[in-house]
Each structure stands twice: as C-alpha cells, then as structure tokens.
Image: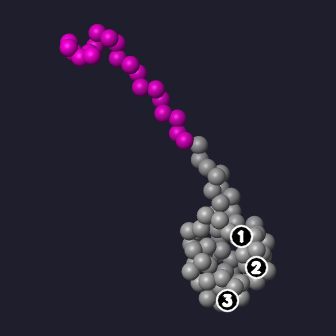
C-alpha cells in the first residue's frame, strides 16, 4: 500500500509558498517541507485539517492511494537429470 502526498500540487494550484502555509497552519517550515516532498510516515488529523482549511481543499486532494504492484512470478528453474552432473559432484 502506498499513500502519496500531493501537497506540492495543491500548493502550486493555490499559489501559496511553503513559508506562508507553514505560518498559517502553525507548523515548522521543515515539517511542511517534509510533507511536501513525501518524506513523512504519518500526518496528524489536526495538521491535515488545518492544511485543508487553509488551502480550501479536501483530504483527497492532498492524499492519493496507489495500490502496490504484485511481485512478478518467476518460473521454476528446471532441475537437471541426475546423470547430467559431472562425476564426483554431490
């Protein structure tokens, strides 16, 4: 499961700077920058609420869910017949 933050897009659409939004929301520039670049593992609902209020958007405008790709299935490696090994190999 992958949740992608699209805060950079919404901020660009609203023409608001990182510094301006950080001041209005009440979080540090560093924390907002980490959110903007997707370097966070979690976000508080109160922070998401404040961002959405300031940007006049919905959480779904900022958050995007991308389903994980299934791992590729590798074909089984065929086993060589017993008599094909050189003499003296286990």
Residue at 76% x, 79% y is 50
Residue 50 - label: 2
| Residue 17 at x, y percent in the picture | 63, 87
Residue at 61% x, 64% y is 41
Which secondary structure type mostly characterizes the magenta part of the structure?
loop
Alpha carbon separation for disc pair 2 and 3: 11 Å
State the image quarter where residue 10 is shown.
Answer: bottom right
Residue that label 3 marks: 23
State the image quarter where residue 12 is shown.
Answer: bottom right
Mark 2: few/some/many CA within 10 Å (<14, 14-19, 20+): some
From this viewpoint, is residue 76 visible?
Answer: yes
Which is more N-terminal, label 1 or label 3? 3
Alpha carbon separation for disc pair 3 and 1: 17 Å
Q: Nearer the viewer, residue 35 or 7?
A: 35
Where disc 1 sits, the SS reads loop
From this viewpoint, is residue 15 visible?
Answer: no
Alpha carbon separation for disc pair 2 and 1: 10 Å
Residue that label 1 marks: 44
Q: Are marks 3 and 1 in contact (CB under 8 Å)?
A: no
Residue at 59% x, 43% y is 70
Q: Are marks 2 and 3 in contact (CB under 8 Å)?
A: no
């Amino acid at each position: 499961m992958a949740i992608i933050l699209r805060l950079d897009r919404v901020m660009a659409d609203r023409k608001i700077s990182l510094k301006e939004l950080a001041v209005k929301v009440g979080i540090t520039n560093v924390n907002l920058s980490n959110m903007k670049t997707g370097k966070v593992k979690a976000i508080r609902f109160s922070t998401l609420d404040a961002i959405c209020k300031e940007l006049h958007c919905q959480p779904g405008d900022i958050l995007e869910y991308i389903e994980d790709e299934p791992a590729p299935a590798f074909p089984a490696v065929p086993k060589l017949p017993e008599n094909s090994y050189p003499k003296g190999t286990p």
